[in-house]
Image (cartoon, coloured by chain):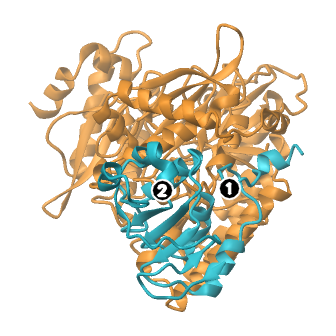
């Protein structure tokens, strides 16, 4: 994985010093809270319901064991012994004191990490495929390109005060594991007919109040123009994105209002101009980055497991993913124990995951946007030993992509924007299905819960989505069906009137029963929904 | 860096040696229509490219920041510098120490903030970043170039 050179380290260290200075000026009264707010946000520091929340960037979701240990130490030292992995492949801490934030950032910088631009109206942490560099189906490893974009987007002088936040995802496989087309910019690394590597650009996707799927605006951007093209996309947005209404300020609204063709025309015009401006890093830089992501020294070994223990076999079937080397798999550590808080990990668990990465996965881990953790390169021969250690620590839930693998935002338990609680609902739904034993029978079923319209829990993209709203002071939950964040991307449709908490749990069970009754061979919930439509579900829910 | 004083309407910092333009700046619309003006003021919604045919007669461009969180002025500034504008480019309005460095990088060379900045803080902010990750018209080499000699 990538390692900072002196330049990168100096940039991060400088940022820590800058933040300490800003915090000091705030304390001295030289900065008003209004002036300080965007500055602390650009360092990942939010003021939440009970305390400051600090979000740490995990660029493209990749980290090593040392970094995971450091995240655990931070949980112990500055928080209450927990961290929360997010849908942006980041980690956040919910109980931070402003006075200690500078020290926390310094601790991060010591392990080549930071909280830069994890919030604010700027380019956020770049996300990517959590199986990058390991997946059998990828064209190339997308992470050198994501790292190129990380550096370009960090401290960008022109784009620190955009109309709204800006999220970029980079993938390099046809299978989309990063919700690429639901980003402000989605980049897919592709090969053209001539065999050259380049990038397809999708612009104007997003969730939130107005969910949109990003249209492709350029099929092939040559590799040595990647940054220039991104810069052109951003400049058009910075100049013309709406600033009169924060709910209409994301780039998706601009692309929608102009039309994709007109937005593209403006980008191409800006791009043509910028090609002469020398904004592109030298191609040698990409060549420098690639070796950091080179394959570790894989060894041949057994290619199958001993299936005599059914619990182990189930976990392997559920939680591992095909690797490009046939003696290895990528193993997913579920942070969704039945009845647990989705994405939460204790300091102890983080230390264990770090140790396991060192022992079994070339010292590498990934954070998934589904709030789980991946050991990307595990020998098939080591799987049983790994699983045994995970089981003992409560990290062995065999539920990847099942109805228990729920994405949930922090909701009203922590978040100052939320209208309703998400976490207790996720806990109760996973308990309901674990008790009824239907989880396995239901197969792949992605359930996503957001506690408000901002959609941090990706409810629009859930096969089943739940949105918490405030209805005259009472929490109410809207159900939607048919969303997908994958390569078959679609937005869910609302079933009808909402439910109270107990009612929505029953409603989820009702729609899954409709599916079980109607499904044909090999169909996932989503496939059945697409085939039979909303009507049978609606009938079961409301008649 | 010349500290020209702290009057709220005045330029506080100026990074050029030529004479200060004594003409009041006009709006972009007014400027395009009259041939004698040499100072123009860009509001956030204005298209800076409307000035490009007239760059040879402009000595001062003021870019107004009614609120610091509206970042359109950064693009306006870069566009003008990229088109070869060499006159004074002045950031006016809600401009504070924490925006100085990026504004300099986008081509601003004069600052007339609503509230005067602390000169020592400003100096520290401008000197803070030894290297940069992006190329702009200020001709600093980006880190990605420095790595390759």
Q: From the rendered image, report the letter of the chain displayed in cyan.
A: B
Disc 1: which residue: B138
**In-image side of A295 versus B8 (left or right):** right
Secondary structure at numbered mark 1:
loop
Secondary structure at numbered mark 2:
loop
Residue that lies at the very extreme toward the left in this rendered image: A543
Q: From the rendered image, report the letter of the chain displayed in orange.
A: A
Residue A195: image location, x then y, percent: 71, 11
Residue drawn at point x = 57 percent, y = 73 percent: B19
User: Is A34 situated above or below B87?
Assistant: below
Res A445 seen here: no
Q: What number is the disc on residue B58?
A: 2
Q: Earlier in the sequence, mark 2 or mark 1?
A: 2
Residue drawn at point x = 41 percent, y = 66 percent: B65
Task: Give the position of the C terminus of chain B as an image quadrant.
Answer: top right
Where, by quadrant of the figure, is residue A386 drawn?
top right
Q: Residues within 10 Å of mark 1 (few under 14, many from 20)?
A: some
Residue that lies at the very extreme toward the front in this rendered image: B36
User: Is A356 situated above or below B58?
Assistant: above
Which one is nearer the viewer's eye here, B148 or A189?
Answer: B148
């Amino acid at each position: 994985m990538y390692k900072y050179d002196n330049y990168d380290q100096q940039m991060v260290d400088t940022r820590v010093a800058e933040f300490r200075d800003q915090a000091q000026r705030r304390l001295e009264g030289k900065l008003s809270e209004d002036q300080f707010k965007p500055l602390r946000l650009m360092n990942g520091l939010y003021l939440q319901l009970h305390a400051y929340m600090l979000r740490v960037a995990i660029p493209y979701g990749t980290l090593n064991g040392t970094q995971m240990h450091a995240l655990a130490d931070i949980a112990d030292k500055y928080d209450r012994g927990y961290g929360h992995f997010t849908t942006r492949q980041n980690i956040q801490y919910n109980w931070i004191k402003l006075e200690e934030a500078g020290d926390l950032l310094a601790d991060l910088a010591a392990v080549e990490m930071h909280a830069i631009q994890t919030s604010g109206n700027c380019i956020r942490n770049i996300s990517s495929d959590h199986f990058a560099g390991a997946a059998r189906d990828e064209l190339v490893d997308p992470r050198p390109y994501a790292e190129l974009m990380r550096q370009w987007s960090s401290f960008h002088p022109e784009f620190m005060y955009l109309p709204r936040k800006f999220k970029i995802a980079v993938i390099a496989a046809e299978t989309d594991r990063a919700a690429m087309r639901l980003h402000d910019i989605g980049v897919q690394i592709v090969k053209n007919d001539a065999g050259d590597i380049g990038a397809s650009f999708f612009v104007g996707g997003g969730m939130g109040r107005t969910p949109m799927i990003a249209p492709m605006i350029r099929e092939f951007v040559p590799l040595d123009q990647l940054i220039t093209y991104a810069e052109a996309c951003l400049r058009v947005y910075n100049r013309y994105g709406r600033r009169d209404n924060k709910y209409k300020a994301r780039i998706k609204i601009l692309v929608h209002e102009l039309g994709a063709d007109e937005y593209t025309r403006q980008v191409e015009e800006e791009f043509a101009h910028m090609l002469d401006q020398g904004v592109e890093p030298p191609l040698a830089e990409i060549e420098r980055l690639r070796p950091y992501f080179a394959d570790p020294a894989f060894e041949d070994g057994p290619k199958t497991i001993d299936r005599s223990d059914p619990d182990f076999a189930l976990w392997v079937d559920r939680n591992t993913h095909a690797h490009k080397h046939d003696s290895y798999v990528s193993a997913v550590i579920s942070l969704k124990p039945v009845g647990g808080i989705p994405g939460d990990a204790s300091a102890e668990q983080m230390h264990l995951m770090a140790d396991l990465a060192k022992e079994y996965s070339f010292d590498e881990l990934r954070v998934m946007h589904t709030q789980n953790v991946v050991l990307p390169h595990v020998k098939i021969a080591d799987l049983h030993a790994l699983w045994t250690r995970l089981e003992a620590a409560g990290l062995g839930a065999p539920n990847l992509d099942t109805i228990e693998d729920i994405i949930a935002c922090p909701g009203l338990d922590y978040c100052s924007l939320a209208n309703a609680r998400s976490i207790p609902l996720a806990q109760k739904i996973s308990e309901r299905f674990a008790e009824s034993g239907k989880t396995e029978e239901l197969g792949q079923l992605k359930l996503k819960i957001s506690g408000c319209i901002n959609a941090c829990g990706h409810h629009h993209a859930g096969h089943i989505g739940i949105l918490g709203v405030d209805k005259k002071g009472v929490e109410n939950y809207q159900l939607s069906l048919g969303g997908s964040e994958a390569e078959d991307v679609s937005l869910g449709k609302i079933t009808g009137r909402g439910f109270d908490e107990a009612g929505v749990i029953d409603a989820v069970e009702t729609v899954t029963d409709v599916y079980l009754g109607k499904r044909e061979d090999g169909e996932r919930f989503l496939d059945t929904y697409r085939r039979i439509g909303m009507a049978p579900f609606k009938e079961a829910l409301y008649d | 860096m010349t500290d020209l004083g702290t009057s709220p309407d005045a330029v506080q910092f100026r990074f050029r040696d030529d004479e200060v333009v004594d003409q009041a700046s006009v709006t972009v619309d007014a400027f395009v229509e009259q041939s004698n003006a040499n100072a123009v003021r860009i509001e956030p919604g204005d298209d800076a490219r409307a000035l490009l045919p007239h760059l040879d007669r402009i000595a001062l461009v003021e870019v107004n920041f009614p609120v610091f969180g509206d970042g359109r002025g950064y693009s306006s500034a870069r566009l003008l510098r990229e088109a070869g504008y060499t006159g004074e480019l002045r950031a006016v309005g809600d401009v504070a120490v924490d925006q100085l460095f990026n504004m300099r990088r986008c081509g601003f060379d004069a600052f007339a903030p609503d509230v005067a900045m602390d000169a020592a803080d400003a100096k520290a902010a401008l000197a803070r970043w030894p290297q940069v990750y992006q190329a702009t018209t200020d001709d600093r080499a980006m880190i990605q170039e420095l790595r390759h000699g």
